[in-house]
Amino acid sequence: MSRSLCQITDFSTAEIKEVLDLCERMKTGKEAPKPLAGKSVACVFTKESLRTRVSFEVGISELGGQPVYITGKEIKLGERETVADAAQVLSRYVGLIMIRTFAHSDVEELAKYATVPVVNGLTDLVHPCQILGDYFTMREHLGKRDKYAVAYLGDGNNITNSWLNLAARLPLDIRVGTDGDCHPDADLVAQAKANPDSSVLITDDPKEAVQGADVLYTDVWASMGQKHLVEEKERKLKKFQINSALLEEAGPKAIVMHCLPAERGKEITNEVMDSSRSVVFDEAENRLHIQKAIMAFLLK
Ligand code: CP
Ligand code: NVA
């Protein structure tokens, strides 16, 4: 078993800071490690992707390696053979495994039996690369601070859970504005609350969530694998839309973030997404930089 990133809490606070600092040095060109020289990386996708696939493939090339794209239809993880067997086979060919899939337990099983690092590129539970990259983006835009106030508006999903995951390790004031039926994972809420330097508020009042927040964050109301719930989620979550009126409640300095892809006009208006307060495309770019740093850290 090698070091892996299944969720953010797999890294200590010091390790997260190390990855963020390495990301900064790599993005600014101060360091250009090639830990994947002569190696391949398995990129397993059982869900669709734009950012994760392209940023990983480009990042792997920039670290000297070669990506091998594998779809869910081919690998049939846990169906053609056990996850443990697939982990051991892949480890004989590649230097690292990146996987995007549904069940978080499959990623943990893969990491348990692989002899190379495994990086989670999104599960139903969490999306660690996204939130580590978003924290880096937040730091770039707001400057390095001891603590940030992040208001997440919408569905309590893998993105919300990853903010909570980060709050368990770094000081964050997390406010989740959501419907009573769409709360984030209870265990991850408890872990975040257990960090005395962080605070967690879960409220059904979007205005309460955004008061004094540094960041307003949202994501699609119905995630991949939940598209059958789209009407129900829309009904329950429409009052949490990030629009100009809600942004005004947050104060003049708050920035707006979205992991993308966005359903414009639903969880976020065009006006806000295209405004100067929005940093959504910087977030997308930073996926490349943070994932390079994560891979370099795990391979060192
Ligand atoms: N944010 C993100 O992970 O985008 P993709 O689903 O396009 O990879
Ligand atoms: N919550 C979304 C994130 C996409 C990057 C989903 O899982 O579909």
Image: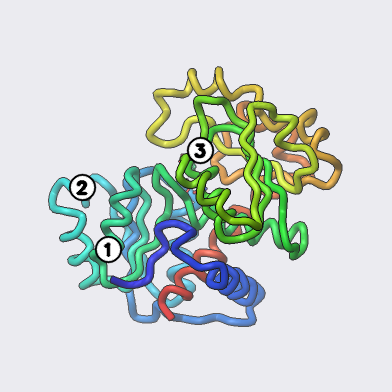
Q: Nearer the viewer, residue 175 or 300?
A: 175
* Badge 1 amino acid: Lys
Residue at 39%, 47% (x, y): give it.
123
Q: Which residue is mark 1?
A: 112
Would you place residue 134 above or below residue 17 in this image? above
Quadrant of the rendering where the N terminus is positioned: bottom left
Q: Nearer the viewer, residue 36 or 293?
A: 293
Q: In the image, is 200 to the left or to the right of 80?
A: right
* Picture coordinates of residue 10, whole percent (x, y): 44, 63
Would you place residue 176 above or below residue 292 in this image? above
- Counting residues from the N terminus, which is met first, the one under dot 3 or under dot 2? 2
Category of crowding for the residue at label 3, using alpha-carbon neighbours closer than 10 angstroms: few (below 14), some (14–19), many (at least 20): many
Q: Which residue is mark 2?
A: 76
Gap in Å between the C-alphas at discs 2 and 1? 18 Å
Residue at 69%, 56% (x, y): give it.
138
Q: Quadrant of residue 152?
A: top right
* Badge 2 amino acid: Lys
Q: Nearer the viewer, residue 22 or 169?
A: 169
Residue at 43%, 77% (x, y): give it.
64
Q: Secondary structure at mark 2?
A: loop
- Counting residues from the N terminus, which is met first, the one under dot 3 or under dot 1? 1
